[in-house]
């Protein structure tokens, strides 16, 4: 029986290693999405003080701070902005492992529990992209484990941090807190050691940035992975075409944050930051999406690359 348990433990460990390896591979090869580029350009690129004072609502402040630190240590790249998510993937898998071990021992049910936690679509998708979703998921799973071992103060803090990592997890956090009350069965203990630490941890990260948020969110239209990959290749073409010349770039809303992300990654200081102002002329290059591609014909632009509704063009030399 002990030998069989060891086999299941080794299988579970192998599965966790494969899942994490797949997350690392995806984080390394996937092109930057519009949401990731937007988060970097609006909240990570500015200074810490500017980030806190932004009028735009930053609902993932905890992840933004971790991403800022990662970029500062390892330079800007798609992998560096996703590194905090990968670290939370380790925390998530470890928490799933510990919960499964406490509930099911080291048999086949333990292996099934770890596999289920690691292979659910939400976990597969969120840990290889930059964003607070994976952090919130990992912190809430850690909360459950900490309650299992009766470390209630830390459990409450992690529950609050999950909301600070992704404000969209406020409702799941409230549901989990209610379930913990049913599990603990002591109102005073739950309020003092779960509710209060959770509220304090969440408010520390959310009150200041959200109190300055007077502007409405301006998330760009989402683009597919293949479209993001085309934008990345089009930027390589732009680097080749522009050389070391100064360049002013106009971009549609869906392309603008991605263009600015790669401009910063490639350290193209002789490019001006891409602007969404497509009405005025005077730009050297245009990244156009959807209906904006009509500008290419209206202004007699030279098309350098086209992929469906995406187009890279430059002004005519005439």
Image (spheres, rainbow, N blue to C red):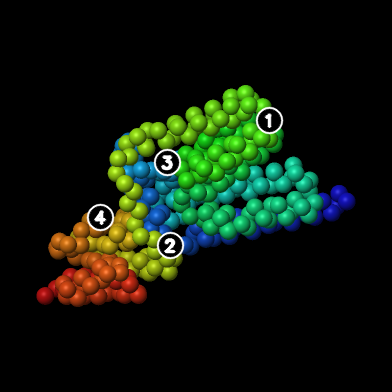
Image height check: is 189 above or below 108?
above
The Cα–Cα distance between marks 3 and 2, rounded to whole angstroms, is: 23 Å
Local packing at callout 3 (Cα closer than 10 Å; few below 14, some 14-19, many 20+) is many
Res 273 label: 4
Mark toward the start of the polypeptide (2 vs 4): 2
Considering every residue shown, the one lying at the far right of the view is: 1
Q: Which residue is mark 1?
A: 185
Q: Which secondary structure, mark 4?
A: loop
The Cα–Cα distance between marks 1 and 4, rounded to whole angstroms, is: 56 Å
Image height check: is 28 above or below 194?
below
Mark toward the start of the polypeptide (1 vs 4): 1
Q: Nearer the viewer, mark 1 or mark 2?
A: 1
Look at 61% across and 57% down and name the residue there.
Answer: 120
Q: Residue 97 in the image: x percent, y percent?
A: 69, 47
The Cα–Cα distance between marks 2 and 4, rounded to whole angstroms, is: 20 Å
Mark toward the start of the polypeptide (1 vs 2): 2
Q: Which residue is mark 3?
A: 61
Q: Is residue 91 visible?
A: no
Confirm or deny contact between disc 3 and disc 2 (CB under 8 A): no
Q: Nearer the viewer, mark 3 or mark 2?
A: 3
Q: Choose between 160 and 40: the one closer to the eye.
A: 160
Q: In which quadrant of the rendered view does residue 255 lie?
A: bottom left
Res 31 label: 2
Q: Nearer the viewer, mark 4 or mark 3?
A: 3
Look at 58% across and 58% down and name the residue there.
Answer: 121
Q: Choose between 63 and 83: the one closer to the eye.
A: 63
Q: Nearer the viewer, mark 3 or mark 1?
A: 1
Quarter of the image where the C terminus is located: bottom left
The Cα–Cα distance between marks 1 and 2, rounded to whole angstroms, is: 48 Å
Q: Residue 34 in the image: x percent, y percent?
A: 38, 58
Q: Which secondary structure, mark 3?
A: helix
Q: Residue 267 in the image: x percent, y percent?
A: 31, 55
């Amino acid at each position: 029986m002990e030998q069989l348990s060891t086999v299941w433990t080794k299988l579970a460990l192998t599965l966790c290693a494969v899942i994490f390896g797949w997350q690392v591979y995806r984080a390394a090869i996937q092109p930057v999405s519009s949401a990731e580029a937007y988060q970097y350009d609006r909240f990570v690129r500015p200074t810490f003080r500017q980030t806190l004072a932004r009028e735009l609502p930053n609902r993932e402040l905890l992840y933004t701070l971790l991403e800022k630190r990662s970029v500062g240590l390892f330079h800007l790249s798609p992998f560096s902005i996703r590194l905090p998510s990968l670290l939370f993937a380790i925390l998530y898998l470890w928490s799933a492992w510990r919960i499964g071990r406490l509930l099911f021992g080291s048999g086949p049910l333990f292996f099934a529990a770890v596999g289920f936690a690691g292979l659910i679509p939400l976990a597969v998708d969120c840990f290889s992209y930059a964003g607070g979703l994976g952090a919130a998921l990992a912190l809430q799973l850690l909360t459950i484990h900490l309650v299992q071992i009766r470390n209630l103060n830390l459990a409450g803090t992690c529950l609050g941090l999950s909301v600070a990592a992704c404000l969209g997890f406020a409702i799941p956090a409230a549901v989990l807190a209610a379930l913990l009350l049913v599990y603990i069965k002591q109102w005073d203990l739950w309020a003092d050691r779960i509710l209060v630490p959770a509220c304090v941890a969440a408010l520390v990260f959310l009150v200041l940035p959200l109190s300055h948020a007077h502007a409405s969110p301006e998330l760009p239209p989402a683009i597919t992975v293949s479209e993001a990959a085309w934008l990345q290749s089009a930027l390589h073409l732009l680097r080749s075409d522009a050389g070391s010349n100064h360049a002013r770039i106009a971009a549609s809303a869906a392309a603008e944050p991605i263009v600015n992300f790669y401009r910063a990654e490639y350290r193209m200081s002789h490019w001006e930051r891409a602007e969404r102002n497509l009405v005025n002329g005077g730009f050297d290059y245009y990244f156009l999406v959807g209906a904006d591609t009509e500008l290419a014909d209206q202004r007699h632009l030279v098309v350098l690359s086209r992929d469906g509704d995406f187009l890279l063009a430059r002004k005519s030399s005439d």
